[in-house]
Amino acid sequence: MSSPSPVFVAGTGRSGTSRLADVIGEHPLIHRIPMETRFLVDPGGLRDVADALTHRYDPTVGEDALHRLSDLLTVRVPGRRDDRGRTVPELVGEGRYRDAVQQLWPLLVAHTFDEPAPAEGFGDGDRPAGPFGPPSRRRVVPRYFRDRGDLLGILRDLVDTLFEGAAADAGKPTWCEKTPFNLLCMGFLWELVPEATIVHVTRHPVAVLASHLAQPWAPSTVDGALAYLGPIYHRWLAWRDTADLAGRRYVEVKAEDLAADWPGQRRALFERLGVGDVTTRSTFEAHRLAHRDRRFDDETRARIDAVLGPVVPAMGYA
């Protein structure tokens, strides 16, 4: 009870992931990383590097993966702010973040060298195109990890340094990270943090669709939203049907159930996370789940049912 496992929150987006992460992070033993960190499962992140330096290895693939990871960790993540103007480095400790990233590269790079770059302009042979010396570019030879576990240990150290450090700063023993598409990366997340609990919050797929239509980052038409959401559901269901979730620390909750019996469902959730029940400021309320729902006409609903019809019962809804 005094040392719960780390928690990842997952969902389709617009299913209650942010609210659920808030609830979990308001427990006195669990610190919520206050924004989506994006470097674990996003393109160019730890998941891609884990594959590129192991079973997908060749020097070109590995170097490209390290280029993308460098861009993600040193440019895109520090440059992205949440709605309060904060960045991930600020939220986990800027010095801690910069030091951890700097210490990562020697562990992933086997060798570096300078490659002459082609001269620009009319230069030919050994003649430079102008009065300046020939340019060059820095190249790296990525390490190859025959034992994937060795690489995962390095990547896990980065996560522990940042997330456990942020939790310790908050006076809590463990952490919770929320990124909706953790949903499609559970296998990797359990490789990275085997003791983690993954909490998957669901919502009726038609309500999820309606909520997506109001978001600036999602398609604004029904057909566009269906094209976006349909593959997410189908990929999750295909993976779920082959995964042994019964043997994992996996918790699935419906947003509607949380709203219908908040105190009881909250108590059950915390029990499954291995912590005692506490009252939280954040709650699930039925009117908040329904306030973006739209009334679709019959023709539109028929198009929705053609895509989501099989998904609805598969996700446990009528």
Image (cartoon, rainbow, N blue to C red):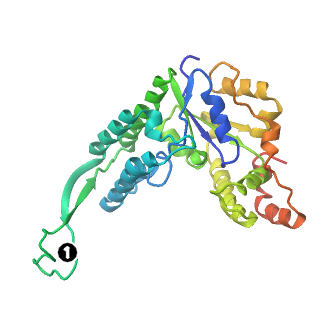
Image quadrant in which you'd find residue 159 = top left
Q: Nearer the viewer, residue 301 or 219?
A: 219
Q: Nearer the viewer, residue 135 or 53?
A: 135
Q: Position of residue 134 (x, y in %)?
A: 15, 69
Residue at image point 67% right, 25% down: 270
Q: Position of residue 182 (x, y in %)?
A: 57, 45
Mark 1 surroundings: few (<14), some (14-19) or many (≥20) residues within 10 A: some
Left-right relation of 19 to 86: right
Tally the numbered discs.
1
Q: Is residue 258 above or below residue 135?
A: above
Left-right relation of 237 to 45: right
Q: Is residue 73 above or below residue 24?
A: below
Instruction: Describe the element under mark 1 as helix, strand or loop.
Output: loop
Check the image and name the residue furthest to the top. 2
Q: Is residue 53 visible?
A: no
Residue at image point 24% right, 49% down: 110
Residue on which disc 1 sits: 119
Left-right relation of 225 to 44: right
Q: Position of residue 278 (x, y in %)?
A: 68, 20
Q: Nearer the viewer, residue 227 or 119?
A: 119
Q: Is residue 277 above or below residue 148?
A: above
Image quadrant in which you'd find residue 116 = bottom left
Q: Nearer the viewer, residue 6 or 280?
A: 280
Check the image and name the residue furthest to the right. 298
Q: Is residue 145 visible?
A: yes
Q: Is residue 292 above or below residue 168?
A: below
Check the image and name the residue furthest to the front. 85
Amino acid type, residue under disc 1 in the picture: Ala
Q: Position of residue 262 (x, y in %)?
A: 78, 29
Residue at image point 74% right, 55% down: 209
